[in-house]
Image (cartoon, grey):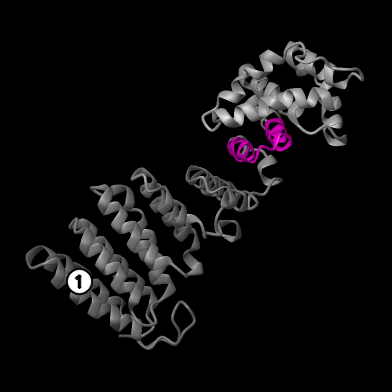
Amino acid sequence: MAELATSATGMELRKEYTEELKTIIPMSQEMATTESLEAAINVLLAFEKKCRLANDFTNLKEVCVHMVRLCREKNDWPKLNSVLAVINKRRSQSKSAIQAVVEEAYAYLEQCPSVQAKTDLATTLKEVVDGKIYVEAQSARLHLMLALLLEEQNDIGGACDMIQDVHVETYGSISKLEKAEYILQQIRLNLLRKDYIRTMIQSRKMNRKTIEEAGFEKVKISFYNMMVEYYTKEKDAWEICLCYSKIYDTSITKADEATKMAALESCVIFLVLSKFDNHASDMMHRLKLLKDVENNALCSNVITLFTTVEIIPHPFNGQELLENHACFSKAFFDADSAAEFKKQFHVRTRTV
């Protein structure tokens, strides 16, 4: 075996075991067939130790990945979990070896024969990657996968707790779109749990400028629909109005006439229900200039009524249509919330 100065990582390389690796891999495959997988793994673990102590990280990575593949080829899922745990706990284990086995085993998650096997493998991988910044992307994805599995079992609390403290917005190895979609899942699960304090905390992680970019239209619509649900519980008509305004001002929404008009009408309804101040007045006058408002009789009549300086009768013309609008029939709108908002029609007419 050749004596080399340094390994691929720059550390002192005491010995290099490439030739021995070429022999031990086929030998272990034969042992797994003729004897047992356990015997083959024991031989490979002994070789892994030699590579690790000699700082031969190239061959160390190869033998670790080979152990994982051997378990998968034999469909021994419990042994796969055991091998992953052993590799992770080895003293002074190489980062490259950990990254390699995590990437290899992560690809097996969709091949698991059962939900329980998938859960066990994902849990093992989560334990391997926890606290390691060089596999932060896999860590975030594993937490989300386990959260969704818990949701399928109706354990909403467990699902929330699984991804609650994943600060995906700080991860540099994940794309902006994946981060945004991840935060949506955090918000959605907190809404399911009816944890509105944490819903607001998670929503603040969403970069509002980012979701205005091209390619983020679906994320933008989903985000503001979730925020409509949150502000409904807070009984904040002005914020609901702003959310519907953002939904309306999206290319996907404007591509569908029915969806576009539903968002615009909802925006106008909650604008009318908002406390009348300079912001609400400015919003009304800006909406009045829109061609879509002009072409929608309901929106046009209401906006004209509330921007004209004169006494508004109660009930005003078109109020019944507003009170029976589909926006008050959404699943998260309970009878008390809808009634509370509808009472405001009388208050707002008197205010103006």
Q: Amino acid at mark 1?
A: Ile
Label 1 packing within 10 angstroms: few (<14), some (14-19), many (20+): many
- The residue nearer to you, when weighing 288 against 17, is 288
For image coordinates 44% across by 67% down, the residue present is 130
In the image, which residues are magenta? 222-246
For image coordinates 41% across by 86% down, the residue present is 13
The answer to which quarter of the image holds residue 61 is bottom left
For image coordinates 57% across by 52% down, the residue present is 198
Residue 122 image position (x, y, % from top left): 34, 57
Q: Eyeballing the image, is 349 above or below 164?
A: above
Magenta stretch: dominant secondary structure: helix
**Horizontal placement of 66 versus 33: left or right?**
right
- The quadrant of the picture occupied by the C terminus is top right
**Horizontal placement of 45 versus 168: left or right?**
left
Outermost right residue: 309
Q: Which residue is mark 1?
A: 41
Residue 169 image position (x, y, % from top left): 60, 56
For image coordinates 38% across by 88% down, the residue present is 14
Whether the magenta-drawn stretch holds residue 106 is answered as no
Residue 158 image position (x, y, % from top left): 40, 54
The mark total stands at: 1
Whether the magenta-drawn stretch holds residue 226 is answered as yes
